[in-house]
Each structure stands twice: as C-alpha cells, then as structure tokens.
Image (cartoon, rainbow, N blue to C red):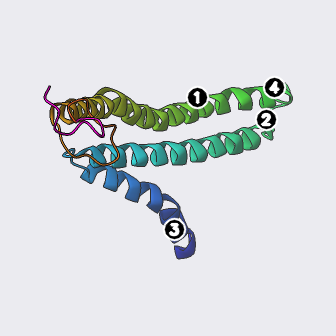
Amino acid sequence: MSDDTGSSEVKVGSDLHKMIQQLEKIEFKTDRDLYNYAKLLRAIGFELYTRVAFDADMITAILSQYKGKWYTFGLQSKIRAKLVGAHLKAGASAAKVLGLAGVKMYASFVKHFIRPEQEAEAEARKGKGSKKPGFSIGDKPSDTAGKPGEAGKAA
C-alpha cells in the first residue's frame, strides 16, 4: 500500500469526520444552535446515504461477477449479490432518514416554540396599540381620537 493511496483514503473521510466533530461541539443554548445541529445532521445523513448507496452498488457489481464452482454459482451469483447489496441499501436509506430527522426536528421546534412566541408577541403588540390613544404612524386611527373638525366638542 503506497502513501498516496493511504492519504487519499483519509482525505475522502475527512469531510464526514469534520462534520461529526462539529456536531459534537454544538451546545444547545440558542435557537441558532438547533438550526446548526439540524443543518449538520442533514449534511451528515446525505453524505452517509451517498457513500453507502454507492458502496452497495459497487459491492453488488463485484459480487455478481464472482465465479465459483460450476454447480454452486453462475447465474445465482447475481441474485446473491443483489441480496448482499440490499442490506447496504437499507443502511443507506437509514442514513437518509437520519438526515431527514434533523430537518423535521427543527421544523417541529419552529412550529411548537417559535411560532407561538411570535403570535403571542403580535397579540401583545395589538393589545398595547389599542390601549394607547394618541399619535400613530401607519396604523388605523383609534376611536379615542376625534374626527377631523370635531376638535373642542365635549363628549
């Protein structure tokens, strides 16, 4: 095994390794941390899915060419190769689900935490605006202010 081959193998796995290290460093303190976690988990899932699915196809192709004893293998080697490769395909789909789980986690966080907070804040702003009579820009005039030309009339 030459040094060139060994370094290329390390380089191929380096991105995945870096992403996993970044995932381990995340501390959940803000909503941005959850977003970064979901983004990294999606990238890791996609990377694993791509690699494992590619390897499954490669192993299936290699094993389908296997020539054994004439009475044991032959056409059966292609069928058996597909059975072996199917296990890796199932693992690849599991990696895909892992990436999707991160996306769903963040979407659920937005639905259950961020949106209710934003809606409550909007309701609070609506309530505050109607209680304060006076000068406003861009809002509808409140009922407490007089109509034009009614200044000085007693209510």
Query: Between residues 18 and 88, which one lies in front from this camera angle?
Result: 18
Amino acid under disc 2: Gly
Name the N-terminal-most of marks 2 and 3. 3
The 10 Å Cα crowd at callout 1, few under 14, some 14 to 19, many 20 or more, is some
Please tell me the numbered disc located at residue 6: 3
Name the N-terminal-most of marks 3 and 1. 3
* Residue position marked by numbered label 2 in the rendering: 68
Name the N-terminal-most of marks 4 and 1. 4
Residue drawn at point x = 80 percent, y = 41 percent: 65
The 10 Å Cα crowd at callout 4, few under 14, some 14 to 19, many 20 or more, is few
**Image side of residue 7 versus residue 120, left or right:** right
Query: Between residues 12 and 140, which one lies in front from this camera angle?
Result: 140
Rendered location of residue 72, percent (x, y)? 79, 25
Q: Residue furthest bottom?
A: 3
* Residue position marked by numbered label 4 in the rendering: 76
**How far separated are the C-alphas under marks 3 and 1?**
29 Å
Is the stretch drawn in magenta largely helix, strand or loop? loop
Q: Secondary structure at mark 2?
A: loop
Residue drawn at point x = 81 percent, y = 38 percent: 67
* Residue position marked by numbered label 1 in the rendering: 90
Please tell me the numbered disc located at residue 48: none
Amino acid under disc 4: Gln
Callout 2–callout 1 Cβ contact below 8 Å: no
Look at the image and give the residue range highlighted in magenta. Answer: 146-155
Q: How many marks?
A: 4
Asked whether 150 falls inside the magenta stretch, the response is: yes
Q: Quadrant of the N terminus?
A: bottom right
The 10 Å Cα crowd at callout 3, few under 14, some 14 to 19, many 20 or more, is few
Q: Secondary structure at mark 1?
A: helix
Residue drawn at point x = 46 percent, y = 60 percent: 15
